[in-house]
Image: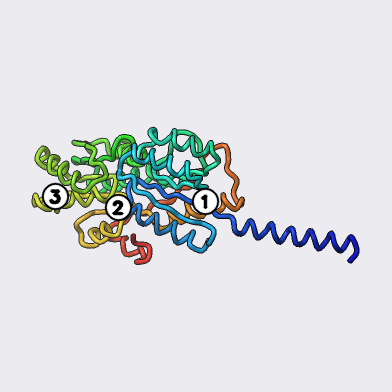
């Protein structure tokens, strides 16, 4: 074998060996939602799992922060200390988790947030159009009330930026388009159905005339529905939710909930996972600013809910 042929063979073998090492590189993705027990976070997980399962060199670990920011901070530290490559995070409190995101990014770990962004730059945020969809709900409720009446808001915790933006969009629509509609109450129901029942009961006791309720997630909308139905006032109150979980869509079909701002959560989770894989493969490069990817909403009402296919209901 000539020296030139020997060198060519050696280079070919080296390339093959290098390719094998790259193919065998193991990556770890951590999924850290506010809690694993909600339909939304379960749907995100399904979308993520479906996307990464075809990658034999990628493992996925999901943890449950139990709706507590301090637990989520500790779990972020666990992912960081264990050398995860990507963390897909739904921050319970944007301000409380910003330092954790900074720490992860500082160690070369890509952070992709879901719905709630954090203050400092990170790889990406895959989010619903919270402000725009909140505006859409406000516009729709206002039109259905002919521009006058009393409405109440079931709020998210104050540090949950997604809920804050939904309420912001809702209030903006009423203020601009329907100034004669009065917001008679707004209380934090902590994303929780039972808490929403309690607060809705209070709204009903204080307001003998209540025309509509906007709950910034579907769990709270379902709680509002239960309270209104128990009080015999469900037919008098238009109840809107946000997210579009399967149980709420069924209640819309039954005429018990008026509508919800639906987003395909499977697609949202899959989008976050695909972005993560592209970062790991080098197909995408992280920029100086957080890349924001917006998943558009759909106003699901009794007239439109049938357009959502069974496989897209989470």
Front disc: 2 or 3: 2
Q: How many marks?
A: 3
Specify whether residue 173 is in view.
Answer: no
Identify the residue at image location x=49%, y=43%: 111
The color scheme shown is rainbow
Residue 91, position as x, y percentages in the image: 38, 41
Badge 1: residue crowd in 10 Å (few <14, some 14–19, many ≥20): many
Q: CA distance from mark 1 to mark 3?
A: 43 Å
Badge 2: residue crowd in 10 Å (few <14, some 14–19, many ≥20): few
Residue 174, position as x, y percentages in the image: 29, 39
Specify whether residue 93 is in view.
Answer: yes
SS class, disc 1 = helix
SS class, disc 3 = helix
**Tag 2 or tag 1, which sits nearer the N-term?**
2
**Tag 3 or tag 1, which sits nearer the N-term?**
3
User: In the rendered image, which residue does mark 1 sit on?
Assistant: 276
Numbered badge on residue 228: 3
User: In the rendered image, which residue does mark 2 sit on?
Assistant: 37
Q: Quadrant of the N terminus?
A: bottom right
Outermost front residue = 1
Could you say which is closer to the camera, residue 268 or residue 10? Answer: 10
């Amino acid at each position: 074998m000539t020296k030139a042929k020997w060198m060519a063979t050696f280079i070919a073998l080296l390339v093959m060996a290098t390719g094998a090492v790259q193919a065998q590189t193991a990556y770890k993705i951590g999924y850290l939602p506010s809690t694993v027990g909600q339909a939304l976070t379960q749907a995100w997980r399904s979308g993520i799992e479906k996307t990464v399962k075809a990658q034999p060199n990628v493992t996925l670990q999901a943890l449950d922060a139990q709706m507590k920011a301090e637990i989520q901070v500790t779990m972020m530290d666990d992912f960081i200390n264990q050398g995860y490559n990507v963390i897909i995070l739904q921050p319970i409190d944007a301000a409380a988790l910003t330092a954790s995101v900074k720490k992860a990014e500082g160690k070369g770990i890509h952070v992709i947030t879901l719905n709630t962004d954090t203050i400092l730059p990170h790889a990406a945020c895959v989010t619903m159009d919270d402000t725009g969809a909140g505006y859409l709900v406000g516009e729709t409720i206002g039109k259905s009330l002919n521009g006058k009446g009393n409405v109440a808001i079931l709020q998210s915790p104050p540090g949950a930026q997604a809920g804050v933006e939904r309420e912001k969009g809702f209030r903006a629509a009423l203020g601009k388009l329907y100034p004669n509609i009065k917001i008679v109450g707004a209380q934090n129901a902590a994303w929780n159905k039972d808490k929403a029942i309690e607060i809705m009961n209070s709204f009903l006791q204080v307001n003998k005339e209540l025309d509509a309720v906007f709950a910034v997630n579907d769990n709270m909308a379902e709680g509002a529905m239960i309270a209104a139905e128990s009080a015999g006032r469900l037919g008098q109150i238009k109840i809107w939710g946000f997210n579009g979980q399967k149980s709420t869509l069924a209640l819309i079909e039954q005429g018990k909930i008026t509508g919800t701002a639906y987003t395909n959560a499977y697609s949202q989770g899959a989008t976050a996972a695909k972005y993560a894989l592209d970062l790991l493969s080098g197909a995408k490069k992280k920029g100086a600013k957080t890349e924001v990817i917006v998943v558009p909403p759909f106003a699901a009402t009794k007239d439109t809910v049938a357009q959502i296919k069974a496989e897209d209901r989470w």
